[in-house]
Image (cartoon, rainbow, N blue to C red):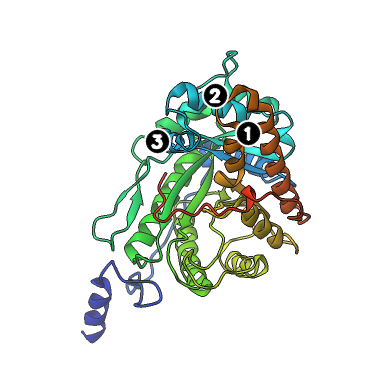
Amino acid sequence: MAACANLAKLNVLSSSQWIGQQPFSQRPSRLSSPRRVSFAIRAAGGYSDELVQTAKSIASPGRGILAIDESNATCGKRLASIGLDNTETNRQAYRQLLLTTPGLGEYISGAILFEETLYQSTTDGKNFVDCLKEKHILPGIKVDKGLVPLPGSNNESWCQGLDGLASRSAEYYKQGARFAKWRTVVSIPCGPSALAVKEAAWGLARYASISQDNGLVPIVEPEILLDGDHPIERTLEVAEKVWSEVFFYLAENNVLFEGILLKPSMVTPGAEHKDKASPETIAKYTLTMLQRRVPPAVPGIMFLSGGQSEVEATLNLNAMNQSPNPWHVSFSYARALQNTVLKTWKGLPENIEAAQKSLLVRAKANSLAQLGKYSAEGEGEEAKKGMFVKGYTY
């Protein structure tokens, strides 16, 4: 009876308990007598070989992902920063600038698109998907529907979008997309709560399974936000717990590990912490987390920049590639590839060529970082400016 009482207490622990401060809710022990267990053989919807090939193609030496999957509202904020209205014409013009950059495929293996962009064409009538394919860049698609408040949590959020995902993914595949992205977040200042971590992990796992069933390689992205004044050790603690949960539920959902890509945050101190970490320290902590939590079967680790400056993101990636890894350690950057491009373009047709050249400069820098050969010598001041925004949403 005492054992049963203790087990009952475990099962009613609050879902808002915090990592490292109170214990997580424990999964119930299997106390009943042994019974026969059968395991389903997953065929990834018949796409297994293609998924593996797609993931390997994206995770190819010296190449990474250009993320231009900002929602229309967020793209509008970017355009407003250079004095442009948030219209479809202006969004199309900017994305055309990026996707038609000559030589981009030398450094970029995949581009994550917003749904609007996946179905858009250039002003000359060429589908953006075809523009990418000509450069041997695989088109990807953002499939989540954004963050909303998570009831019962410590003022945290969860990511919506599972409803109708299978049918949408099938249509995206027909349009030419070959990989997908789903972003959810974990906030350290908010705990994080056990509920929020489990919700993030479960949602990512369901999305990954649905994506693979429809021929799309899922990028698994539980972003641990930079917000907070916590030390790097706290970030590592939370990251390890989050990725442990993520891979537990990926396995529960029979996700093919060889056919996924990860998009983790780098393990850094909170943006408001008094001590700034060096690239070598960030590399050490980040690789420690990966080695403890990520199976070597996963082909690619495509880091997000998370508000770091263009140069910081590249230096940190370079530091991680100073020694061999069992994975392709690379980049999936948005702002850290686009910031200088936008400011160079300014919405003026006569600046398109210069803006495209600035994109190539950043893409090449990160290509070199993926190979462990980058040097920050000669980088401009604009590229060194931090882009962290407290409470950033997109």
Going 42% across and 33% down the picture, which residue do you hit?
72
Residues 238 and 13: in front is: 238
Give the secondary structure at mark 3: helix
Who comes first in sequence, dot 3 or dot 2?
3
Image coordinates for residue 304, horizontal then vertical, percent? 56, 51
Residue 75 against residue 332 in the figure, above or below: above
Please, what is the three-letter code of the amino acid marked with disc 2?
Ala
Residue 158 against residue 290 in the figure, above or below: above
Distance, label 3 to label 1, CA atoms, is 25 Å
Who comes first in sequence, dot 1 or dot 2?
2
Q: Which mark is residue 326?
A: none
Give the secondary structure at mark 1: strand
Categorize mark 3 by other alpha carbons within 10 Å: few (<14), some (14-19), many (20+): few
- Whether residue 243 sits left or right of residue 5 in the image: it is right
Residue lying at the far bottom of the rendered structure: 2
Q: Are marks 3 and 1 in contact (CB under 8 Å)?
A: no
Residues 330 and 338: in front is: 338
Image coordinates for residue 16, horizontal then vertical, percent? 29, 67
Going 45% across and 41% down the picture, which residue do you hit?
210
Q: Is residue 297 visible?
A: no
Foreground: disc 3 or disc 1? 3
Residue lying at the far top of the rendered structure: 124
Q: Which mark is residue 73?
A: 3
Residue at the disc numbered 2: 93
On the rendered image, what quadrant is the C terminus found in? Answer: top left
Q: Is residue 155 visible?
A: yes
Who comes first in sequence, dot 3 or dot 1?
3
Q: Which mark is residue 138?
A: 1
Q: Are marks 3 and 2 in contact (CB under 8 Å)?
A: no
